[in-house]
């Protein structure tokens, strides 16, 4: 039986494109849910997926010196 690919090689631009598409889909889903008077389960799933992508990113932090965030 075939196995799932667990490693992906995406560029920063490709990942940005995916995140942008998910944000647009989330907005459209939220607006559709509001018009239909439904709960936002679809938008919630997209939001959680965006959170997973965000949590897997490695952000720049200087190796030496004091780090001032913000």
Image (cartoon, rainbow, N blue to C red):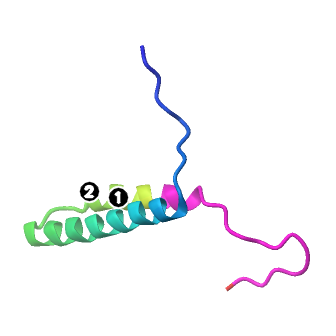
Q: Label 1: few (<14), some or many (≥20) within 10 Å?
A: some
Q: Residues within 10 Å of mark 2 (few under 14, many from 20)?
A: few
Q: Give coordinates of residue 66: x percent, y percent.
A: 87, 81
Q: In this view, does 13 lie to the left or right of 64?
A: left
The answer to if 29 sits in the magenta stretch is no
1 to the left or right of 10:
left
The residue under label 1 is 46
Question: Pointer 2 and pointer 1: residues touching (CB < 8 Å)?
Answer: yes
Mark 2, residue position = 42
Q: In which quarter of the image is the N terminus?
A: top left
Q: What stretch of residues is rendered in magenta?
A: 51-69
Instruction: Please tell me which residue lies in front, 31 or 65.
Output: 65
Question: Horizontal and vertical percent for residue 45?
Answer: 34, 55
Q: Which residue is drawn at 10% across and 72% down?
A: 35
> Where does the image place residue 29, in percent across and percent down from the top left?
21, 65
Dot 2: element: helix
Percent x, y for residue 13? 48, 65
């Amino acid at each position: 039986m075939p196995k799932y690919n667990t490693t992906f090689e995406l560029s920063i631009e490709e990942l940005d494109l995916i995140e942008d598409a998910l944000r647009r889909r989330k907005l459209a889903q939220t607006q559709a849910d509001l018009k239909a008077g439904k709960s936002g389960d679809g938008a919630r799933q997209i939001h959680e997926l965006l959170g997973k992508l965000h949590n897997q990113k490695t952000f720049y932090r200087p190796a030496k010196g004091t780090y001032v965030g913000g």
